[in-house]
Amino acid sequence: MNWITVCKTNEIAEEEPKAMEFEDKKIGVFMIEERFFAVENVCPHAFALLTEGFIEGFTVECPLHEAIFNLETGALESGPGCRNLSTYLVRVENGEVQVQL
């Protein structure tokens, strides 16, 4: 598996997650309480980018259908999400946020 640099740590804020696409995978990178998380960015219920959703604590709510997902685990907590999200390992190296694909 490869580590891919997605952004610098100062390019992401809690209110502004990053939407990325690598190897045909849409990935959302979120920062919550100075920790970084990467999850599948498309709601499994119907196409909606979770980086455009509503963030509360360690969860994100789909902007279209109100499915709520845990950003730490990818678990569907409520709503019509149909399944859990895929998650990706994240590390910070030399001020860069990297995701393992």
Image: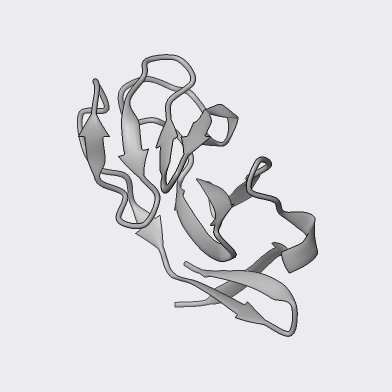
Query: Based on the displayed image, in which of its 4 quarters is residue 76 positioned?
Result: top left
Query: Up-down: is 43 above or below 5?
Result: above
Q: With 30 as the anchor, is 87 left or right in this view? A: left
- Spot occupied by residue 98 in the image (x, y as percentages of width and height): 60, 71
Residue at horizontal 54 percent and vertical 63 percent from the top: 36
Query: Up-down: is 23 above or below 3?
Result: above
- Spot occupied by residue 5 in the image (x, y as percentages of width and height): 67, 69
Instruction: Tell which residue pokes out farthest to the top in this image.
Output: 64
Q: Nearer the viewer, residue 20 or 34?
A: 34
Residue at horizontal 46 percent and vertical 37 percent from the top: 56
- Spot occupied by residue 58 in the image (x, y as percentages of width and height): 42, 48
Residue at horizontal 40 percent and vertical 50 percent from the top: 71
Query: Based on the displayed image, in which of its 4 quarters is residue 4 positioned?
Result: bottom right
- Spot occupied by residue 39 in the image (x, y as percentages of width and height): 44, 51
Say how the picture is coloured. one colour
Which quarter of the figure is the N terminus placed in? Answer: bottom left
Q: Nearer the viewer, residue 27 or 79?
A: 79
Total numbered labels placed on residues in the image: 0
Query: Based on the displayed image, in which of its 4 quarters is residue 3 positioned?
Result: bottom right
Q: With 60 as the anchor, is 91 left or right in this view? A: right
Residue at horizontal 73 percent and vertical 66 percent from the top: 9
Query: Up-down: is 97 above or below 13?
Result: below
Instruction: Tell which residue pokes out farthest to the bottom in this image.
Output: 94
Q: With 9 as the anchor, is 80 left or right in this view? A: left
